[in-house]
Image (cartoon, rainbow, N blue to C red):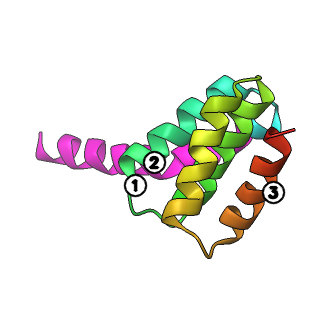
Amino acid sequence: VAAVKSSDSSQASTVKKDQFEVGDEFFEKKEWKRAILSYQKYRDANPRGKKFADATYKIGISFQEIGLKDEARTFYDEVIAKFPQSAEAKKARTRLKSLKK
């Protein structure tokens, strides 16, 4: 039973790590809603993850692509607030400017 439990927990952590990659796959296919869900699962599981800023930024893009500008703005603002010096923040600022048009 212990062996089964340990393999289950290792699979669970593997699944969490893969959520970002799953999100990227949906993102590339332009399956925006599924990408948002996957990136959000990544963010929930990895609040200090290396790809948190990227996931947050890509959620913003996904919302923008489906026409939800206010939601997109919220995620762009979060990237800028939490990661002001990041490449994602720079891209988010550019996207925010385009949203105001």
Magenta segment, which residues?
Answer: 1-26
Say which residue appears at 80% left-offset and 40% top-offset. Answer: 100
For the question of whether residue 31 can be seen, the reply is yes
* Residue furthest to the bottom: 85
Judging by the rendered image, the residue that carries numbered circle 1 is 46
Amino acid residing under circle 3: Thr
Say which residue appears at 53% left-offset and 52% top-offset. Answer: 78
- Distance between the alpha carbons at the discs numbered 1 and 3: 26 Å
- Position in image of residue 20 (x %, y %): 58, 48
Residues tagged 2 and 1 counted as in contact (Cβ below 8 A): yes
Closer to the observer: label 1 or label 3? 3
If you read the primary sequence from the N terminus, does the residue marked by circle 1 or circle 3 appear first? Answer: 1
* Residue furthest to the front: 101
Judging by the rendered image, the residue that carries numbered circle 3 is 94
Residues tagged 1 and 3 counted as in contact (Cβ below 8 A): no
Amino acid residing under circle 1: Asn
